[in-house]
Image (spheres, rainbow, N blue to C red):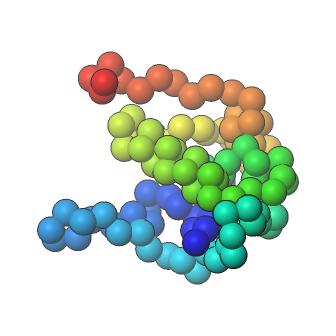
Amino acid sequence: MLHRDLKSQNVFLTANNTVKLGDFGISKVLESTNDVAMTVQGTPYYMSPEVCQSKPYDYKSDVWALGCILYELATLKHAFTAENLLGLVFKIVQDKQDPIPDIYS
């Protein structure tokens, strides 16, 4: 299952501290581990470089989005920000984000 819209708003914590993912409205079932998707889906802040470059992508794009979520939890800001979509895409593909605070190992 390729979620394709992992973002902090789609991660839920239950009463017993179980983490659950929601909003599978644009998810896609991949038939094998070699399958890839081609359409641009998801929220721009969490897009992987492959999606930004209109390249085929797979579950690794969801792992990228998860990394963006973890960065956001640690820093309380998006990993990549810009004034417009083109600037955001450029930063995702070319730029580096600020380091995570030293309080984390």
Farthest residue to the left: give it: 16
Specify the quadrant that holds the N terminus: bottom right
Q: Residue at x 79, y 44 (%)?
A: 86
Q: Quadrant of residue 24?
A: bottom right
Q: Position of residue 40 (x, y in %)?
A: 77, 63
Q: Position of residue 28 (x, y in %)?
A: 65, 75
Give the number of marks: 0
Q: Residue at x 36, y 23 (%)?
A: 101
Q: Position of residue 89 (x, y in %)?
A: 75, 43
Task: From the viewer's perspective, tell me whether residue 10 is left or right of residue 53.
Answer: left
Work out whether 8 lies above or below 103.
Answer: below
Q: Residue at x 70, y 34 (%)?
A: 91
Specify the quadrant that holds the C terminus: top left
Q: Quadrant of residue 25?
A: bottom right
Task: From the viewer's perspective, tell me whether residue 17 is left or right of residue 77.
Answer: left
Closest to the observer: 14 or 37? 37
Does the rendering let one see residue 54?
Answer: yes
Q: Quadrant of residue 36?
A: bottom right
Task: From the viewer's perspective, tell me whether residue 93 is left or right of residue 63.
Answer: right
Farthest residue to the bottom: give it: 25
Does the rendering let one see residue 26?
Answer: no
Farthest residue to the right: give it: 54
Q: Position of residue 76 (x, y in %)?
A: 38, 40
Q: Residue at x 53, y 38 (%)?
A: 79
Work out whether 48 lies above or below 3.
Answer: above
Work out whether 4 lies above or below 48.
Answer: below
